[in-house]
Image (spheres, rainbow, N blue to C red):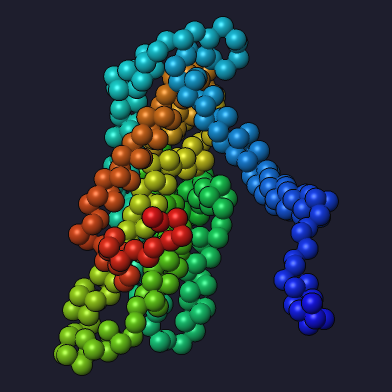
Amino acid sequence: MSGGQLLEDSALIVPSPSPGAAARRHRNRLSLRQRRVGAFYVFTGPWVLGFTALTAYPLGYALWLSFTNSDGLSDRSRFVGLANYKEVFTDPDTMASLSRTALFTGITVPLSIIAGLILAVLVNQPIRARGLFRTLLYLPAVVPPVGAALTFKLIFDRDSGAANGLLDLFHIDGVTWLTDPYARWVLMVLTMWGVGNIMIVSLAGLQDIPKEFLEAARVDGANPWQTFTRITLPLLSPVIFFQVVTGIIGSLQSFAPLLIALNPTPAGVTAVPQSNYFYMIDVFAQFFANGRYGYASAMLWVLFAIIVFVTFLLFRLSKGAVFYSVEPEPAKNKPRTMGDA
């Protein structure tokens, strides 16, 4: 056999890997997988622990409390089944507080959205010192809710408040603003005080509308009102819908009436005027004034169910009223993935 033939035959021989090398590669792959799994748990572990300790466990405990007559102090609580939930729907005081909350929500949410949209349209105009006006209108929204409530409490104080001081300049007798029937108006003014948040979101939506649409409408002879109602509002509908949903959720959980009450403590919760005695104020009273932890927990779960139902209803009703600039792709055009058959 020639030397060339020997070289060709030797080139065809592939040395088989030794068992030790294969084991090392397997260990390397295994260690890489273990490192990735370990990194996953290291990064997600704090969130999982926080969610379990601060969200999942409190929710589960509150759900269990809602089926008991616990007072939050003694361990002699007794399982009462659905008795607390039945009382929520049959207690006239609870239903009255819920109706006041619904009425307050139905008034303040539309007013806040309309006021915020009007301010956004105004500060979106090419005027001088536009940035200054935007800052001044947004500043009240930066104030924390507790600070704003305490400020309003001082402004509308019966003896030393600025509101009665202004009335005194016109020789008008002072008004006890923080009691009925004026307390509800103070609360509405406090709610409108933070309309700067809505203005900023609406302003962002206005600036996201393509200028070509507005220019095309102007060329076609549309007046400003027609342009606003036929182009601006439809394109702004997703932003308005977002504000409606978040506004309703926040308003149903309103706790501001207690902050501006004459005596905002568990013992003085009855100082909240009747017109401002909202659902969350009733929950606060049941928890800390009456010691009915089981009943108050049931009230909170009922409120949660109401919020979920209202949100679902809003999404159902918005299908023909909200216009998105990017429509979802049809199912038949869905790109195939590696997992598809």
Looking at the image, which is closer to me, 186 or 14? 14
Which residue appears farthest toward the front when viewing the image? 1
Residue at (30, 45) in percent of width and height: 312
Residue 54: x percent and y percent? 61, 36
Residue at (35, 52) in percent of width and height: 245
Rendering quarter of residue 236: bottom left
Vertical comparison of 215 with 88: above or below? below
Q: Quadrant of the N terminus?
A: bottom right
Residue at (52, 27) in percent of width and height: 60
Image-based side of 285 in relation to 33, left or right: left
Vertical comparison of 180 with 70: above or below? below
Residue 200: x percent and y percent? 45, 68
Looking at the image, which is closer to me, 307 or 100? 307
Q: Quadrant of the C terminus?
A: bottom left
Vertical comparison of 87 with 5: above or below? above
Residue at (21, 73) in percent of width and height: 229
Which residue appears farthest toward the left when viewing the image? 221
**Does the rendering let one see residue 314?**
yes
Image-based side of 262 in relation to 217, left or right: right
**Does the rendering let one see residue 169?**
no
Rendering quarter of residue 332: bottom left
Residue 223: x percent and y percent? 19, 85
Residue 50: x percent and y percent? 64, 40
